[in-house]
Image (tube, rainbow, N blue to C red):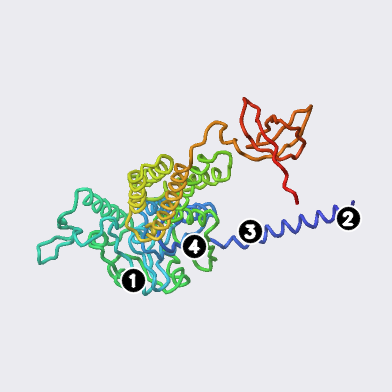
Amino acid sequence: MEGFIKLVKKMTLLLLLSVCIFAAGNAYADIWQIDIEGAIGPATADHMIRGLEQAEAADAELVLIRIDTPGGLDLSMRDMIKAILAARVPVVGYVSPGGARAASAGTYLLYATHIAAMAPGTNLGAATPVQIGGPSLPRMPSAEEGGQPGQATPAVGKSPMEHKIVNDAVAYIQSLSQLRGRNAEWAERAVREGASLSAEDALQMGVIDLMADSVAELLDELDGRVVEVAGSAVTLVTAELAIVRHSVDWRSEFLGVITNPNIAYMLMLAGIYGLLIEFYNPGVGLPGVIGAVCLLLALYALQLLPVSYAGLGLILLGVALMTAEAFAPSFGILGPGGIVAFVFGSIMLMDTDLPGYQIAMPMIAAFTVFSVGILVVALGLILKARRQELVSGLDHLLGVSAEIEYVRDNVAWARLDGELWEVSCDTRLAPHDPIVVDAIDGVTLLVSKQKEESS
């Protein structure tokens, strides 16, 4: 017993020592780095916002957001910017490594940070809303045309809604530039004209605060700088501080998978078809369970994505029409109409022109062929059933051969169509005697005994 107590004490001391070492090792880990790579979407926003919250909880000296993105969804970008503006720790945006970019939504994100930095060989800009991008966007008039800074000529043929979207984006990025003291005129050009800048030009024009070849060089230049955070002046102390990288966890990875438009599309259709199979053949259970889970995951993913409800409605209408064709065939009306609605709905489902958030055409074609195949098979089975001779009553038992299953109390019984029948015969019957049905009298079969073939 004493040996066991000593062992417990030693293990407790080791555990406390490990905790102390871990705490000491993290006492200097005051700089949190969050990487934003690829298209900005719900998973990216979730990853960055939770990382910022954890950095604040850990009393980090600052948060370094490394940016390399072609842009992304407006709603996700705005959620990330709200978190940056509400942060209680300094947030530094750093476009790196060389060859990286902060395009479209990345430009807004960089403008929102307390300090904006870029590595040589990087660029930013092209912040025009993608949904209405095109050659007829409003443009900045030149000095020769009598234009004034900040004044844009209206685009020909653009709807009032498109003008509102552009003006809203301009006002948004200008508010960020005024908040951080950066070049507001170029920010407007980035939205209206889709203008872009290299890192060197961005530094000269006051779009960013500094350039650095590496994170280490960036931290050296940040040391001693004074930034305003939540209305208070904060002096950055970055010398000899360790960096904690906020890596992507399982939650962000899972969210990134299901919010992929192609995966969400597959989950939605798998859910719909699973439930249809369960309703058609109740009691199986597995298709219904899988279908319900897939459909719920798809609905969760779609509410985070820019979905066109018209496209979603057309998909559901197409599936409903093809299902109706299978159960009540119209041979040329419901089925083809459902296929057309399904295809157009799938194409229209994603309400954005961003390349990373489009459903692949091969995916749409594959599910269309699959749906048409199911429809053709169902119609073939229906046609086959219609060609079969109608059988009703007990007349189909006439002439059927069977054998006596058993004899009890001088009454013989035979099994036909899965049921036991009382049989009556002019000759004595024994178990396993072959018989043939000659007539039916109520619930009694009138049979004759077949002669057994000699071997």
Sequence order check: which comes first, mark 3 or mark 1? 3
The tag on residue 3 is 2
Q: CA distance from mark 3 to mark 1?
A: 39 Å
Rendered location of residue 425, percent (x, y) = 70, 31
**Which residue matches tag 1?**
199
Q: CA distance from mark 4 to mark 3?
A: 19 Å
Type of residue at label 4? Gln
Sequence order check: which comes first, mark 4 or mark 2? 2
SS assignment at label 3: helix
Residue 230 showing in the rendered view: no
- Considering only vertical position in the picture, is 389 above or below 373? above
Q: Nearer the viewer, residue 386 or 26?
A: 386
2 vs 3, front mark: 2
Mark 3–mark 1 CB contact (< 8 Å): no
**Which residue matches tag 4?**
33
Which residue, as the protein is rendered here, is positioned at the far top? 442
The tag on residue 23 is 3
Rendered location of residue 233, percent (x, y) = 41, 55
What residue is rendered at 65% in x and 30% in y?
A: 446
Mark 2 surroundings within 10 Å by alpha-carbon count, few (fewer than 14), some (14 through 19), many (20 or more): few
